[in-house]
């Protein structure tokens, strides 16, 4: 039995009825990468490193770097507009804007609010999510819960990072790993039994400071001393992060599959957080997954934090358009420390768009 709930009054036009227990499907996707390419050879001019070391240890050949005037919100706005265009959705019909980022434009206001304003999502609430590199999976979890619970019909989930602004360019342990970029998806209510089938989330508070930007918050406020010490940039204990990433990405992927009642054989592609190639290969082997099912683009973008899964998903869909009923497994690990995975069943997007157009024009 379906129940019709009232929604908040819309000053422009009558509120749409919201049904509880909707399914939540991706109906639009878009991404943006800055044009400036930083190669391993470029990095060898800055720190004591070389192309061979970076390729063998990380699989990264180059990454993108935001230009002057670009920031997390400006990149997020471009990706979001592309996702809305793909979904044929007007900004005023978005109910909630989420931005997953570790590198917000400001501590206040939230980057999601800046994006909401720039795009003109005039009826939407907006908030940021900080789950570091797991931000896309956490964002999908939140978006799908809003939709399944009936509080929203359309959520714009933006993931955007300007990690190169928080990198110590004298620290070869970290500066070779990260890049900038943005991706966005529209997550939308549908009666089709598709979309987000399961979500698994995990966390172990990083009290050991394995991956940290120490200064600039309330614990260590910004001062001349923190700037001099470069305490506003990322520090990482790479070896420990590596082991935890492989263990938890494997376990959380298995949990999400079990919750969805599916096996790896049912999955057409795994789209993982692009941390580094060795983490991805070790996870793929631990899962016993055929290598060709693990999508990898870390070689060209480096680790783009919360944006990496949406960037990878966008690139995958451009190369191999999804068919209705295809299953995808998304899996991530990142600072926090956080991890998570979700299983998606690809929806009949054209039918959702058509049904929505009829409803909104009625
Ligand atoms: N170029 C050349 N040498 C380097 C560089 C570099 N860029 N960086 C470190 N080294 C040196 C070290 O100084 C060390 O030298 P030493 O033996 O003389 O002391 C040597 O290389 C080996 O260092 P390790 O840290 O043991 O190298 P490792 O094989 O572990 O690789 C790496 C380092 C790539 C960071 C690895 O630990 C890793 O991938 N960790 C995962 C971290 C990660 O991806 N974090 C991203 C955020 S979290 C996430 O997204 C999952």
Image: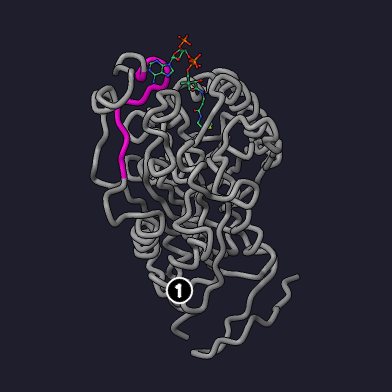
Q: Is residue 98 above or below residue 327?
A: below
Of 141 and 169, nearer the camera is 169
- Identify the image quadrant of residue 239: top right
Specify whether residue 61 is painted magenta: yes
Magenta stretch bounds: 54-65
**Left or right: residue 34 compared with residue 344:** left
The quarter of the image holding the N terminus is: bottom right
The residue shown at (31%, 14%) is 52
Residue, far front:
224
Disc 1 residue crowd, few under 14, some 14–19, many 20+, Cα 10 Å: many
Q: Position of residue 6 (x, y in %)?
A: 68, 82
Would residue 197 be visible to someone looking at this image?
Answer: yes
Residue at image mark 1: 121
Farthest right residue in view: 1
**Residue 241 image offset from top left, x and y in percent:** 58, 26
Res. 268 in view: no
The colouring scheme, among rainbow, by chain, secondary structure or one colour, is one colour
Q: Is mark 1 within 8 Å of ligand 1?
A: no
* Residue plotted at (24% across, 42% down): 36
Q: Is residue 41 magenta?
A: no
* Front in this rendered view, residue 289 or 246: 246
The residue at 56%/29% (across/down) is 265
Camera-side residue of 206 and 343: 206
Instruction: Give residue 110's position: percent from left, percent from top.
Output: 52, 63
Residue 198 rendering spot, x and y as whole percentages:
65, 46
The image quadrant of residue 337 is top right
The residue at the point 38 percent across, 41 percent down is 164
Provide the secondary structure element on which disc 1 rests. Answer: loop
Residue 115 to residue 129: above or below: below
Is residue 34 found left or right of 281 in the rendered image? left
176 left or right, relative to 5? left
């Amino acid at each position: 039995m379906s129940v019709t709930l009232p929604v908040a009054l819309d000053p422009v036009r009558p509120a749409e009825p919201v049904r509880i227990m909707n399914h939540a499907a991706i109906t639009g996707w878009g991404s943006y990468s800055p044009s400036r390419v930083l190669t391993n050879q470029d990095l060898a001019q800055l720190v004591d490193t070389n192309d061979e070391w970076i390729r063998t240890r990380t699989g990264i050949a180059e990454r993108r770097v935001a230009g002057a005037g670009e920031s997390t919100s400006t990149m997020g706005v471009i990706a979001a507009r592309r996702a809305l265009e793909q979904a044929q959705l007007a900004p005023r019909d978005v109910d909630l804007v989420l931005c997953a980022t570790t590198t917000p434009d400001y501590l206040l206001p939230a980057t999601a609010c800046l994006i909401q304003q720039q795009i003109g999502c005039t009826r939407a609430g907006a908030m940021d999510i900080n789950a570091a590199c797991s931000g896309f999976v956490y964002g999908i979890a939140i978006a799908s819960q809003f939709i399944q619970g009936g509080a929203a019909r359309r959520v714009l989930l933006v993931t955007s990072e300007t990690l190169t602004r928080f990198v110590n360019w004298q620290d070869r342990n970290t500066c070779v790993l990260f890049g900038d970029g943005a991706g966005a998806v529209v997550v939308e209510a549908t009666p089709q039994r598709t979309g987000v089938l399961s979500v698994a989330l995990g966390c172990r508070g990083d009290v050991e400071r394995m991956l940290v930007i120490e200064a600039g918050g309330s614990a260590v406020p910004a001062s001349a001393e923190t700037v001099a010490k470069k305490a506003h940039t990322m520090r990482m204990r790479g070896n420990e992060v590596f082991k935890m990433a492989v263990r938890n990405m494997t376990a959380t992927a298995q949990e999400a599959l079990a919750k969805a009642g599916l096996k790896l054989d049912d999955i057409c592609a795994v789209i993982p957080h692009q941390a580094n190639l060795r983490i991805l290969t070790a996870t793929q082997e631990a899962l016993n997954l055929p290598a060709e099912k693990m999508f990898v683009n870390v070689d060209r973008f480096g680790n783009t934090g919360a944006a990496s899964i949406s960037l990878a998903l966008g690139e995958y869909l451009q190369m191999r358009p999804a068919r209705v009923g295809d299953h995808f497994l998304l899996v991530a690990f990142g600072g926090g420390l956080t991890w998570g995975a979700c299983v998606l069943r690809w929806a009949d997007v054209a039918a959702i768009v058509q049904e929505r157009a009829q409803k909104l024009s009625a």
